[in-house]
């Protein structure tokens, strides 16, 4: 059987991490790319020996030979490109965030349902062996009912300085939308995707606008920086569970690179990710236990693994490995957090 044909739109940084997945897939192969920058497109084509190159993404979307569109552009172009691709009868895998605004994700879901094609968000952390091991343990009931979570993704002096990340016109937001989606998606997935009900939060830029503010990823932070550099929130879910989340690109926090962690607390046990540790106790013997989950090495990097699993889901007509409805809940929480910052109080979600 011939392989599904893949075309990437936006052949910048993250697109490079998807390529090993399309190369490893038994179900799909990368045959084309599109980018608004002719220079980037030409260099990418030469590097990866891809000759079908389009400087207008609409031409790639129109290409009848293409089955899967892989969207790797800055955030604000995810929804229009995904909707156009779905309308053209293509399956779509789209980088995170699926779209920065919940209303746009709803439109993407409607386009998916009309087309009958698959839509997946590239939440690669779910595809790491350690995340899969944790998910399987939780689904087996090891934690009981999870009633509280604490999650954070914090960087010290590490703001991306490209316009695609730091200008609302391209990204719609700062670390909430860039890295908050990662830790939030993973936390909700482990919790069994409870429906969010309300959030109280703050989103501020305390460090980015200081004179001489700089990032280890590109020197002085441009004046065009108009997003938050820090956010924190308290989320209530319809099932009574709660979550505390903190995200930042710039924080006087003692970390080399990135501090990304999560604690989940349930009626039978607790757990820590990424340490993959399960904590429990025996009330009869009054003993406490810490158990380390077995983790096997990952054959493919998670960005690649997600592409392999998306293509497989298409071939097997299995559900999307990361359903858009779950990304809608993630973005509804972050959108609510921004609304709560503006309102100065807790806001309802949904
Ligand atoms: N999953 C992850 O860990 C991860 C990591 C980095 C980036 N991302 C996501 O990937 C996306 C892109 O980030 P990046 O770091 O690769 O950015 P990038 O700036 O390196 O690359 C984006 C590319 O898209 C092109 N582009 C911009 N608008 C376009 C349009 N309308 N049509 C076609 N091409 C267009 C640009 O010319 C550029 O080459 C963002 O949504 C980001 O959130 C995800």
Image: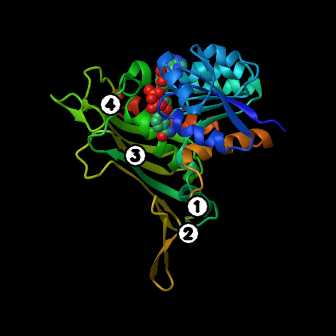
Decide: is 44 above or below 38: below
C-alpha span from label 4 to label 1: 33 Å
C-alpha span from label 3 to label 2: 27 Å
Report the front residue among 274 and 49.
Answer: 49
Q: Earlier in the sequence, mark 4 or mark 2?
A: 4
Q: Is residue 256 left or right of residue 286?
A: left
C-alpha span from label 3 to label 4: 15 Å
Q: Which residue is mark 2?
A: 294
Q: Which residue is mark 4?
A: 228
The part of the image, by quadrant, that contains residue 134 is bottom right
Q: Earlier in the sequence, mark 1 or mark 2?
A: 1
In the rendered image, the quadrant that contains the N terminus is top right
Q: Is residue 113 left or right of residue 265?
A: right
Report the front residue among 237 and 315.
Answer: 315
Secondary structure at badge 3 equals strand
Q: Which residue is mark 3?
A: 245
Secondary structure at badge 2 equals loop
C-alpha span from label 1 to label 2: 8 Å
Q: Residue at x 29, y 52 (%)?
A: 255
Labelled disc at residue 168: none
In the rendered image, the quadrant that contains the C terminus is top right
C-alpha span from label 3 to label 1: 23 Å
Q: Earlier in the sequence, mark 3 or mark 4?
A: 4
Circles 4 and 1, Cβ within 8 Å, touching? The answer is no
Q: From the viewer's perspective, is the residue at label 3 or at label 1 nearer?
A: 1
User: What x and y, as percent, mark residue 57?
Assistant: 60, 17
Q: Which residue is mark 1?
A: 133
Decide: is 344 above or below 76: below
Q: From the viewer's perspective, is the residue at label 4 or at label 1 nearer?
A: 1
């Amino acid at each position: 059987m011939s392989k599904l044909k893949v075309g990437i739109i936006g052949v910048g940084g993250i697109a490079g991490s998807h390529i090993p997945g399309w190369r490893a897939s038994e179900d799909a192969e990368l045959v084309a790319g599109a980018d608004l920058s002719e220079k980037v497109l030409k260099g990418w084509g030469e590097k990866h020996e891809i000759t079908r190159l389009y400087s207008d993404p609409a031409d790639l979307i129109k290409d009848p030979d293409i089955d899967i569109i892989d969207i790797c552009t800055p955030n604000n172009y995810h929804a229009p490109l995904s909707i156009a691709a779905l309308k053209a009868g293509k399956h779509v895998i789209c980088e995170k965030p699926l779209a920065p605004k919940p209303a746009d994700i709803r439109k993407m879901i409607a386009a998916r349902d009309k087309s009958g094609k698959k839509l997946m968000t590239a939440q690669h952390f779910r595809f790491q062996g350690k995340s899969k091991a944790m998910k399987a343990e939780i689904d087996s009931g090891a934690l009981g009912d999870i009633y509280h979570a604490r999650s954070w993704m914090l960087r010290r002096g590490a703001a991306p300085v490209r316009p695609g990340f730091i200008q609302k016109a391209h990204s719609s937001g700062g670390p909430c939308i860039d890295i908050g989606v990662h830790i939030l998606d993973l936390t909700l997935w482990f919790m069994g995707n409870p429906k969010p009900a309300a959030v109280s939060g703050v989103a501020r830029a305390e460090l980015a606008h200081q004179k001489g503010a700089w990032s280890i990823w590109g020197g002085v932070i441009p004046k065009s920086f108009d997003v938050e550099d820090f956010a924190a929130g308290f989320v209530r879910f319809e099932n009574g569970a709660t979550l505390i989340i903190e995200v930042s690109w710039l924080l006087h926090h003692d970390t080399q690179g990135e501090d990304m962690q999560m604690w989940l607390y349930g009626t039978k046990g607790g757990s820590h990710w990424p340490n993959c540790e399960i904590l429990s106790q025996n009330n009869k013997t009054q003993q406490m236990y810490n158990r380390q989950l077995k983790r096997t090495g990952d054959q493919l990097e998670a960005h690649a693994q997600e592409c392999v699993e998306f293509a497989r889901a298409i071939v097997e007509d299995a559900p999307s490995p990361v359903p858009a409805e779950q990304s809608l809940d993630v973005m509804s929480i972050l959108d609510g957090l921004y609304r709560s910052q503006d309102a100065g109080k807790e806001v309802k979600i949904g």
